[in-house]
Amino acid sequence: MGSSQARIDSVYAERLISPVYEAAGNRMGRGSVYAEIAIWTLVLSLVFIMTLAIPTAHAKSCIALGSRWGVPPEEQRADAFIASYFTSRARWYRGYTPYNWYGSSTDRYHILRAAWGAGHRRSLVFYIGHGGCEAIWKWSTWRFEMHWFITTDSEWWPDKVYDMDIYHESACRNVRFVILWTCHGGDVIGGFHSSGDPYGMPHAWLHTTRLSSDGYKRPDGRGYVFIGWTKAAPLLTANKGEGRRFMYYFIRYFFDRTRRSVNEALDYASRMVWRVKCFEDSKYYKGWTRGWWIFSTRFRMVVYGDGSFRA
């Protein structure tokens, strides 16, 4: 009985030990085999833990989106430059994982993916392109309800991605900072209609309505901030490219190694573009009107939430 068991153990051990030991003709006992199994289990466990740790090392993402639909070629070049600068600056100076989806990658899938930060726990999002608002009929309440949208990239007719679509993807609240350089994106903070559908781009992206209505002068300290435009948004190349210069200096200072806040970056960009003391004195904060009477267009940049937020 003992001899038979020993032969079984010997065969079992031979199957488990490495080919190196087999070539050497070694015969290991039960204890040695179990020790080797324990060592390999430990090694594989460490490898598994290391693979899990890789995503957490890049738990921050910076996402640029932009639609070229209806945008002049000169403006497209400026938009593409800012999108690239936004993601590259975040990568090199703050260690963010960059996703530059400007152009053809700005489709419904990638916009909704950006709404949950592409799976990263802390995400910054920049979108530039056409946007708007419109009344949508709701059969559940038998009335029209206002909703805001941004457009996908398309040569012919773009798809509209509405605030309620984005809201349903942002429940994780990974997105901490959003710039929507689009018309009407900052008209309202948002809320819920009587139908239960969410509305408003700040509400949709940040998944909250607890945002200061003036995050520049009264930052709420909650760590979420939205920058957008009420009514119309100017082209980056308009007014001798002041929009492009503003964005360039804002992004440059925002991702500076000294960890500037949103408000400090707004102040810096305002000083560099208009030679004013701070953002409050700037053209973008005060707003301006172009045109006359019913044909006029109002431009004004708004900051909702926490202007003290740092990247």
Image: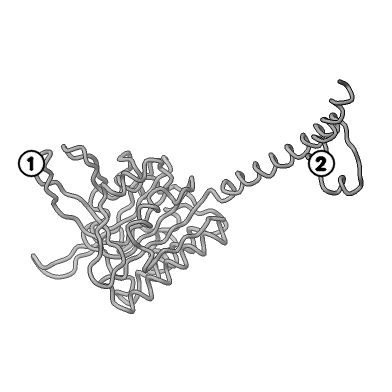
CA gap, disc 1 and disc 2:
73 Å
| Residue 265 visible to the viewer | yes
Mark 2, secondary structure of its residue: loop
- Quadrant in the rendering for residue 198: top left
- The residue beneath circle 1 is 142
Residue 148: x percent and y percent?
A: 22, 53
- Determine the image quadrant of residue 222: top left
Q: Label 1 amino acid? A: Trp
State the SS at label 1. Answer: loop
229 shown above or below 166: below
Residue at 28%, 50% (x, y): give it.
201
**Residue at x 14%, y 50% (from the top left corner):** 136
The image's colour scheme reads one colour
Amino acid type at circle 2 is Ile
Residue found 40% across the figure and 71% down from its top: 80
Q: Earlier in the sequence, mark 1 or mark 2?
A: 2
Which residue corresponds to mark 2?
17
25 shown above or below 269: above
Q: Are marks 1 and 2 in contact (CB under 8 Å)?
A: no
Residue in front for this viewpoint, 102 or 139: 139
Q: Above or below — where is 3 with respect to 264?
A: above
- Front residue of 227/62: it is 62
